[in-house]
Image (spheres, rainbow, N blue to C red):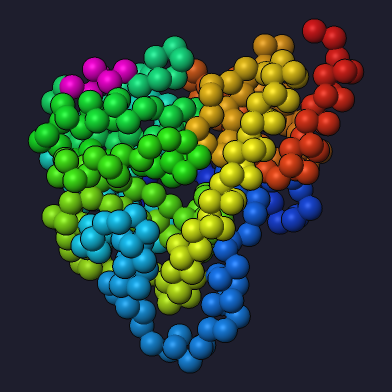
Amino acid sequence: MNAWEKNIRNVKPYVPGEQPADKSVIKLNTNENPYPPAPGVSRVLNNMDTDSLRLYPDPTIGLLVDEIANFYNVKSDEVFVGVGSDDVLAIAFLTFFNSDKKVLFPDITYSFYPVWCDLYRIPYETQALDEDFKIVKEDYYKDNGGIVIANPNAPTSIYEEIEVIEDIVKHNPDSVVIIDEAYIDFAGESALSLTSKYDNLLVVQTFSKSRSMAGMRIGYAMGNPKLIKALNDVKYSFNSYTMNQTAILAGVEAVKDKDYFEMVIQKILNTRKKAESSFRKLGFSFPKSGTNFFFVSHEYIPAKDLYGLLKENDIYVRYFDLPRINNYLRITIGSDEQMKVLFDFIEKYISKIQF
C-alpha cells in the first residue's frame, strides 16, 4: 500500500437499485412512480430560456422554497431544499449529529443511514424492530445523540401512527429527531403537524415518489427556523449552488398542480388495493403497505430464487440479502399493466411447480 492510500477515507457505500439500460423491462425495483410528472413540468422545460443557464442559480432556491411553504401552509424560513432527500438527510446528519453520543435508528430501515454515520464518523446504535417489523418506541427513550425514523419505513412498507412518532419526539427533547417521510403521501398523517409543537423535530420529504421526479433530484426538510438556518449554514459552507435552475423551475410547477398530484396518488392507491388481493391469491404474505411498494414473502418460494427468475425474464424487483429480511422481496407498485405482467408470470411459475 502506498503511503497516500493510508489516508483515504474507507467507507462501505450504499448500493442503489439497478437501473437497466433496456427501457422495455418491467422495472419494479426502485420505487419510482410509473406516471409522468405534472404537465406544467413539461411546459416549463420546453419553454425554458436557456440563456439563463449561463448564470448561477439562486443559492437560496427561493422560488421553490416559497412554493413548498405555500403548499404546506408553513413559513419559508421553515423549509430547506436540497438535491434529493438523500442530500437533505446527509446534510442533516452532518449538521445535527455532532456529539459523542450514539444516534439511534431501526435495525431494518433505509440502508443509507449507517453509510452516512460511517462517512461522518458518527457513532450509532440500531434498535431492533419487533417480530412484526414495528418500532418499539420504548427503545428510543434512552440517552442519545439524535434519532432517525423512516415513516413509512423502507423496505418494510410499514407506517407508524402519528401517536407513536410524537411519543418518541416527546421523550427526546434534547436531541434532534428526523422523520424521513419519503413515502408519506401514500400513508397517513405527516409528522409535519408536530413541528410547531416540538422545535427539535425535522421532517424530510421528496419529489421522487409521489411527484414522479426521481430523475430531477429534489428533496426538502421542514421544521423550526433554527434547524433550517443550521442546515443552510452547513450547506453554504461547502456548496452554495446545490440545485440547478432547471430543477428549481420544474419543481415549482410540480408543486403548483395539486389536482394532478392527488390524482396520481389515488391511481397508485387503487392499484395497491388490487395488488394486495393478487399477492394474497398467489400465497404471499406481507405487512400492510403505507407506501408505493410491497414487502412480500412466500411460504414455499425462496425470495432469492424468485428474484433471480424474475430478473431473467426482464422483471426487476429488489432483494436484500440481509438478516431477518432475506426471504422478502420489495416490489414497487407499477402501472396496472406492469402489475398484470408481474402477476401473470408468477401465476404461471407457481402452476408449474409442486410444493
Is the C terminus in the top left, top right, bottom left or bottom right quadrant? top right
What percent of the width, then of the height, locates residue 11?
Answer: 37, 44
Displayed quadrant of residue 278: top right
Residue 103 falls left or right of residue 161: left
What percent of the width, then of the height, locates residue 340?
Answer: 79, 37
Which is nearer the eye, 124 or 253? Answer: 253
Which is nearer the eye, 344 or 63? Answer: 63
Asked if the magenta segment contains residue 90, the reply would be no
Q: Residue at x 28, y 42 (%)?
A: 193
Asked if the magenta segment contains residue 139, the reply would be yes
Displayed quadrant of residue 104: top left
Residue extending farthest front: 259
What percent of the width, then of the height, locates residue 206?
Answer: 43, 52
Residue 252 falls left or right of residue 28: left
Q: Is residue 36 above or below residue 120?
A: below
Q: Is residue 207 above or below residue 239?
A: above
Range drawn in magenta: 136-141
